[in-house]
Amino acid sequence: DDAKKLWGKHYGDWLAQDAPYGSYVGATDIDLISSAFYSHSVELLIKAGKVLGKDMTGYEELHHNIVKAFREAFPKRTTQTAHVLALQFGLAEDPAEEAAELVQIIRDNGNRLQTGFLGTPYLLHVLSQNGFSETAYDLLLQEAFPSWLYEVEHGATTIWEHWDGIRDDGTIWSKDMNSYNHYAYGCVMDWIYGVAAGIQTVEEHPGFEQIRIRPVPDKRLGWLTVTLKTAHGTVRSGWVCQGETVRYEIETPVRSVICIEGKDCLVEAGKYVFWGNLSQAD
């Protein structure tokens, strides 16, 4: 029956660039991917259970065993997505070493990504979280294939399904599956809002009841301003580079922690201007 036909079906790191040309499934081991998301799912369940006042001891033990099994089964990660998932879901034994290996793979690939639908949403985030925001900006601002700006340079006004939906010679990737308005890689906006502009939720105060704002500017981009509508009002975070100086303009509708150059400032609702040094911005 239909249920049996679907059993065992796995799309992998869909449309990643590290598989043979023309393949829909990336090179990252599908068992590694499944195990990583299994760990993540159990971790989310534990958090939800604790909020509800449940005893999650059994699931905490399960999560511990999943992490242990993951490290034993996949001691060496070789693809960008494998490194990304290990970092994002707390599965890396040594996050600093894992992040350095990820950066090296990116450098060896000409400062270009190779990730598909599963690795791309977390790629820039794990770089920033591990002290490599400059590398994250390298990928954001990359114009060579594959990259977001490659699409722009080839006439895109929306996000493509394939990194190479249109090739340099004008030919298309495929006639049967080649959307030019496909959200998947639009996930980069989550990093732009949450890291570059720095608008972040506070887990203990959901729904933007309180906000943490920690912008990460880059001179190559020059300036950035974003606004986000919440149930409590509009959040605005902007910065502009002026030489080695950065001017930050931030507006928050609720009590917030604004972090500039590693220094936290607790503020009430209002508009604020900060000045900083670009070399200290990350």
Image (spheres, rainbow, N blue to C red):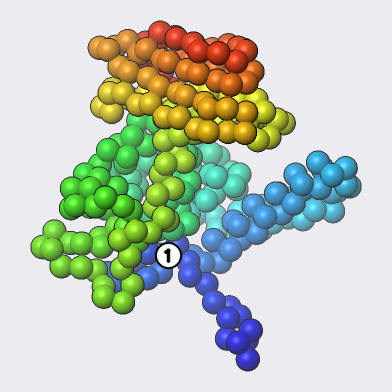
Q: Position of residue 38 (x, y in %)?
A: 65, 59
| Residue 141 quadrant | top left
Which of these two is toward me, 95 or 236? 236
Q: Is residue 157 above or below residue 278?
A: below
Q: Report whether residue 239 is seen.
A: yes
Q: Amino acid at mark 1?
A: Trp
Horizontal arrangement in the rendering, residue 209 relative to residue 190 (left or right): right
Look at 54% across and 55% down and name the residue there. Answer: 75
Horizontal arrangement in the rendering, residue 168 relative to residue 102 (left or right): left
Q: Position of residue 121 (x, y in %)?
A: 46, 49
Q: Position of residue 8 (x, y in %)?
A: 58, 78
Look at 31% across and 52% down and name the residue there. Answer: 158
| Residue 9 quadrant | bottom right
Look at 53% across and 44% down and name the residue there. Answer: 87
List the residue tagged with mark 1. Answer: 14
Q: Position of residue 140 (x, y in %)?
A: 32, 40
